[in-house]
Amino acid sequence: MSPAARERFLVTGALGCIGAWTVRTLVREQSPVVAFDLAGDRKRLRLIMSERITFVQGDITDLGSVERALDEHEITNLIHLAALQVPFARANPPLGAEVNVVGTVNIFEAACRRRDRIERVVYTSSMGMFDAADADGSDGVLHVDAAAHPATHYGVYKLANEGNARVYWLDNKLSTIGIRPMVVYGPGRDQGMTSGPTKAILAAVVGRPYRIAFGGRTVLQYAGDVARTLIVASRSGLEGAQVFNLGGSLTRMDELVSAIEDAVPEARGLVTFEPQPLPFPEVIDDAGLDVLGDVPVTPMREAVRQTVEVFRSRLAQDDLDPETHGLEAAVAST
Ligand SMILES: NC(=O)c1ccc[n+]([C@@H]2O[C@H](COP(=O)([O-])OP(=O)(O)OC[C@H]3O[C@@H](n4cnc5c(N)ncnc54)[C@H](O)[C@@H]3O)[C@@H](O)[C@H]2O)c1
């Protein structure tokens, strides 16, 4: 049997934004995949796919539930995305630590106990573990081996995960690949500190004003591209505790707004942004990522256009509730 014929993926956090795109990508290429998530709401999956999926409701803080899912479905490829994002970790740091750190150790431990079947774990770390000042003082670039000085609990948890991945390699020869996204955008990105660009696109489509909470330049990464990168990483054959910065489209907020206005001309003037940049490095060194294989980057204008198309088509089917997908309730004018 070829390795591809044996593949059975499990995606944790599968009902989240990147998870839904990862499940969709695998389903569309007819690779067996189990979607694992604590939540039950499939709103992000419904936005981007209509195919049936195999779903296991489970909690990554419960090692037993992870292990059962891996064994019942004879999983060979594990992509770990479940986490609490910055605002949720800030609101409840003990829970954030339990899910983001203990949950991730559970994933590594469960995979480690099945190294004969699971070759490596691919997981999302984050550029959010770096402070803007962690970029190289001479060229302004955040290099992959930069020292991290996180300013949020979330960043500290992600840094801890990279450390635990390294120790699982040193102690047990469990191979892991950590991918560090920056600002993921596209259908389904409806929560978290950097969800503004996607909410702005949705607001434009439904004709509402929206102010993105940051300006400056940042690297935007289309959710479908992130999903493909994770899958490519899972199949890469790389050994060790590897970590990669994820590239994308380095974009100024005024460029994003202009792309939105070109895709939705009737929304001209509705999307604005705060001037201050995100407190993270702007320019990211993603050299080295190509050792994984063919990693896609959809140009920003094209990704905006595709996102508009998804929202418009749902709207045309009367199947797009803006509040469900991250916008605050419109204030009725009197
Ligand atoms: N979105 C970004 O811009 C970005 C940037 C850097 C890193 N990341 C990382 O990528 C991953 C996915 O991000 P996303 O944007 O898809 O997040 P998301 O918030 O949309 O989805 C997270 C999912 O994890 C699930 N989950 C939470 N606790 C769980 C638990 N205890 N057990 C099982 N499932 C649980 C949630 O129900 C949710 O479906 C996360 O690890 C995140 O930290 C995201």
Image (cartoon, rainbow, N blue to C red):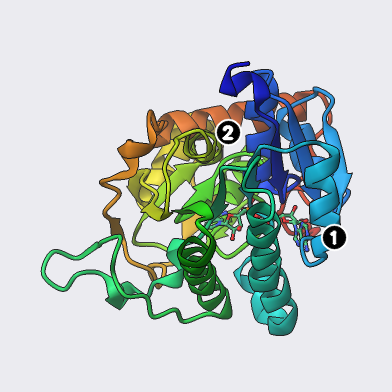
Residue at 28% x, 45% y: name it. 288
Residue at 50% x, 52% y: name it. 176
Q: Is residue 18 left or right of residue 14?
A: left
Cβ–Cβ under 8 Å for marks 2 and 1:
no
Quarter of the image for residue 2 reads top right
Q: In this view, does 202 lie to the left or right of 316?
A: left
Q: Which amino acid type is marked by label 1?
A: Gly
Report whether residue 83 is seen: no
Q: Reply above or below: 292 against 197.
A: above
Q: Is residue 320 left or right of residue 187?
A: right
Question: Is residue 49 or residue 115 the one in the foreground?
Answer: 115
- Which residue is identified by label 2? 307
- Which residue is identified by label 1? 64
Q: Earlier in the sequence, mark 2 or mark 1?
A: 1
Q: Where residue 153 sits in the image (x, y, percent)?
A: 57, 80
Going by the picture, which residue comes out furthest to the left?
138
